């Protein structure tokens, strides 16, 4: 499964002009060696020389070059809006297709996301749903090259069909998932693209993402789907998990199998443990387990056991804290084997009990409280996520116009605010998401982080006070021998309850104090655990120099004051200003990158010379344990065919680069 317009990088430079990538104007030395033909000048956007060729020398703008490509296609590929406008005004056909692939200039704009030229062509009557010889429409090509901004533009403004199929039955979602362009996948799902469509080989987008080992694309598809999506088989009877295993993508296979178990939380730990030892070439276990989950999913959610499982580790934590409190009271405070407690020590001991009891109250609050769920009712209701169409107002959100695709939630069908995240465990988007805590069986977010931090502080105080009182009581017991060995033996025999409490209390205290310290540090910096873990991925956490920069940090005092008083930091007033300063696209169509926003520049590209064929199709096989094959070939060009390439815009026959093969 290979994209049809083969593009490889070379040494030429480009510049980013307002989010639109263009070639730099050639120097005088480069101009001297450039062919003086209409195709090269259109590629470079040299209007002066183009004007002379057309109007003085009578060159036609409607004649293809020796490779069968038109001047308008070359200007479209390089986003030369002025040159394209000039060619259209002088008779260039916006719907002219080349001889070998049957693609128009509009197809070529999708390679680099040339929104300006695409808009110009569409305004002049270009056919948006025109397919080439492989059935690829513009939406397919944008998905093949990860041009999310252009895909959004043609879908929202011009109504492009995002579910159109090519000759092999593949939609743009198939291509985006296969290529690993997560932003495109997220946008297509947000616009209600059909995620379960099966192509000619029976593969869904999830199958192709699994074949290529695109874990992030698999994650987005799974979160937006259901258990049935995981169990869809291709024409050879293989699920996505099996295909991932056959291709050697163990991490993807493990994720997909564990996601099957996620729908039945009771068996997730068993499945993950067993997957560490099973042979990944034999997925009969996975298939039978998944079918069992599918049959019992509804029953588990309604049964008593299902409800208990949903509580997670909360009951265990209640028992642990309650058990420690009772042990401390019985074995340390009012123990008959220890001397009578003094008023001062008794004050600290009962203060520890009070803190522990208060911690239980806060445990209930932070485990049952709304952590800051973002209401998804504006887009879809919880009862009809599969069928209800997306509210069009969401597509007009300025965040999408700014190219902030990471703020799309394809599961909740909302444009979530910055700092929020979709929790896979809760299946909800949480504002100012920090992390999902299994101990409270709830997310820690904007509305319950204060309760969570207060719970940690109270429990740390309780464990520290109770531990200190315990060691003091044992150390000052006049009946205890002074010899160290005898002291330990005596304590173990006479005060076993107090010793057991101290050991467990100290062990738990070490873990809780570390978590409390990390949370306190993050509160002082006004940053979340999720943001720290994904600092390299979130563009709003990068400064103008590309290094980490926290735009929400207003100083330790202000951060801590806001948190203590309000329970969270109010960032609505500072986010837009900081983002503008950092250059994170807050202007319409500011970004147009091919790799899901990973870069704002696009490498200069080359096209094949032999026949100037911009479509280099290849075969791609993946083998199952039944020795079946999936052949991802469009036409009759085999994998490994090499072709000569020339730098784009330099014209045909100049500066041949080394041979290259598609992949």
Image: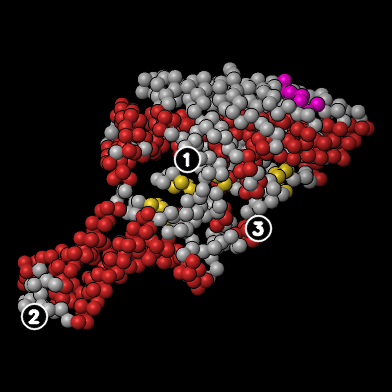
Identify the residue under disc 1. 382
Q: Quick one: 51 or 457, which is closer to the camera?
A: 457
Identify the residue under disc 2. 478
Q: Quadrant of the C terminus?
A: top right
Which quarter of the figure has residue 390? top right
Label 1: how many residues lie within 10 Å, few (<14), some (14-19) or many (20+)? Answer: few
Which quarter of the figure has residue 550? bottom right
Q: Is residue 232 above or below residue 146?
A: above
- Quote the CA–CA distance across marks 3 and 2: 69 Å
Quick check: 21 left or right of 568?
A: right
- Residue 388 seen: yes
The residue located at (65%, 48%) in the rendering is: 398
The magenta span reads: 93-99
Residue 580's disc is 3
- Quote the CA–CA distance across marks 2 and 1: 66 Å
Quick check: 249 left or right of 196?
A: left
The residue located at (64%, 29%) in the rendering is: 161
- Residue 655 seen: no
Count of numbered tags: 3
Dot 2 or dot 1: first in sequence order is 1
Residue 538 location (% of width, % of height): 54, 52
Residue 287 location (% of width, % of height): 33, 28
Secondary structure of the residue carrying tag 3 is helix
The residue located at (32%, 34%) in the rendering is: 299
Residue 651 location (% of width, % of height): 75, 32
Quick check: 538 left or right of 227?
A: right
Residue 36 location (% of width, % of height): 83, 34
Label 2: how many residues lie within 10 Å, few (<14), some (14-19) or many (20+)? Answer: few
The outermost residue toward the top is 636
Secondary structure of the residue carrying tag 2 is loop
Camera-near label (2 vs 1) is: 1
């Amino acid at each position: 499964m290979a994209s049809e317009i083969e593009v490889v990088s070379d040494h030429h430079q480009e510049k980013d002009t307002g989010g639109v990538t263009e070639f730099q104007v050639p120097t005088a030395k480069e101009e001297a060696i450039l062919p003086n033909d209409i195709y090269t000048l259109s590629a470079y956007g040299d209007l002066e020389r183009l004007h002379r060729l057309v109007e003085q020398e009578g060159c036609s703008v409607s004649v293809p070059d020796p490779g069968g490509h038109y001047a308008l296609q070359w200007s479209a590929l390089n986003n030369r809006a002025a040159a394209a406008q000039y060619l259209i005004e002088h008779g260039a056909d916006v719907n002219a297709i080349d001889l070998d692939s049957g693609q128009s200039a509009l197809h070529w704009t999708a390679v680099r996301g040339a929104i300006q030229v695409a808009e110009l062509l569409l305004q002049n009557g270009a056919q948006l749903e025109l397919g080439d010889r492989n059935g690829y429409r513009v939406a397919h090509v944008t998905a093949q090259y990860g041009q999310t901004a252009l895909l959004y533009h043609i879908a929202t403004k011009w109504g492009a069909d995002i579910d159109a199929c090519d000759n092999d039955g593949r939609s743009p979602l198939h291509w985006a998932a296969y290529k690993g362009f997560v932003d495109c996948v997220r946008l297509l799902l947000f616009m209600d693209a059909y995620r379960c469509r099966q192509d000619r080989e029976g593969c869904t987008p999830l199958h192709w993402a699994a074949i290529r080992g695109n874990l992030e694309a698999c994650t987005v598809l799974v979160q937006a789907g259901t258990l049935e999506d995981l169990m869809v088989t291709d024409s050879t009877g293989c699920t996505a998990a099996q295909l991932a295993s056959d291709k050697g993508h163990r991490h993807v296979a493990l994720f997909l199998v564990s996601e099957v178990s996620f729908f039945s939380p009771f068996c997730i730990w068993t499945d993950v443990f067993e997957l560490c030892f099973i042979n990944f070439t034999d997925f009969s276990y996975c298939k039978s387990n998944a079918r069992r989950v599918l049959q019992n999913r509804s029953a588990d959610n309604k049964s008593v056991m299902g409800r208990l499982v949903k509580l997670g580790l909360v009951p265990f934590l209640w028992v642990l804290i309650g058990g420690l409190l009772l042990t401390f009271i019985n074995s340390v405070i009012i123990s008959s084997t220890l001397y009578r407690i003094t008023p001062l020590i008794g004050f600290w001991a009962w203060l520890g009990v009070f803190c522990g009891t208060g911690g239980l109250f806060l445990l209930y609050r932070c485990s049952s409280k709304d952590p800051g769920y973002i209401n998804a009712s504006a887009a879809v209701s919880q009862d009809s996520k599969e069928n209800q169409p997306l509210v069009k107002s969401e597509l007009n959100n300025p965040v999408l116009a700014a190219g902030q695709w990471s703020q799309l939630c394809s599961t909740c069908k909302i444009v979530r605010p910055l700092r929020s995240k979709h929790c896979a465990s809760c299946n909800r988007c949480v504002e100012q998401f920090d992390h999902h805590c299994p101990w409270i069986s709830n997310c820690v977010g904007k509305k319950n982080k204060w309760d969570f931090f207060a719970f940690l502080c109270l429990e740390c105080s309780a464990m520290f006070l109770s531990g200190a009182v315990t060691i003091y009581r044992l150390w000052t017991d006049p009946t205890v021998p002074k010899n160290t060995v005898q002291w330990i033996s005596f304590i173990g025999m006479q005060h076993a309850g107090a010793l057991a409490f101290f050991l467990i209390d100290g062990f738990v205290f070490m873990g809780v104090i570390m978590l409390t310290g990390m949370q306190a540090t993050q509160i002082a910096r006004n940053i979340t655990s999720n943001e720290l873990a994904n600092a390299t991925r979130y563009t709003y956490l990068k400064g103008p120099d590309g290094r980490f920069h926290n735009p929400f940090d207003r100083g330790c005092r202000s951060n801590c004051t806001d948190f203590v008083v309000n329970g969270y930091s109010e960032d609505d007033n500072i986010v837009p200003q900081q983002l503008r300063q950092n250059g994170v696209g807050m202007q319409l169509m500011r970004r147009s990158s091919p790799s899901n926003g990973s870069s704002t520049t696009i490498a200069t590209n080359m096209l094949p010379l032999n026949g100037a064929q911009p479509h280099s199709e290849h075969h791609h096989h993946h083998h199952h344990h039944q020795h079946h094959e999936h052949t991802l070939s469009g036409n009759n060009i085999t994998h490994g065919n090499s072709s000569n390439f020339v730098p784009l815009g330099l014209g045909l026959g100049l500066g041949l680069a080394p041979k290259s093969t598609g992949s």
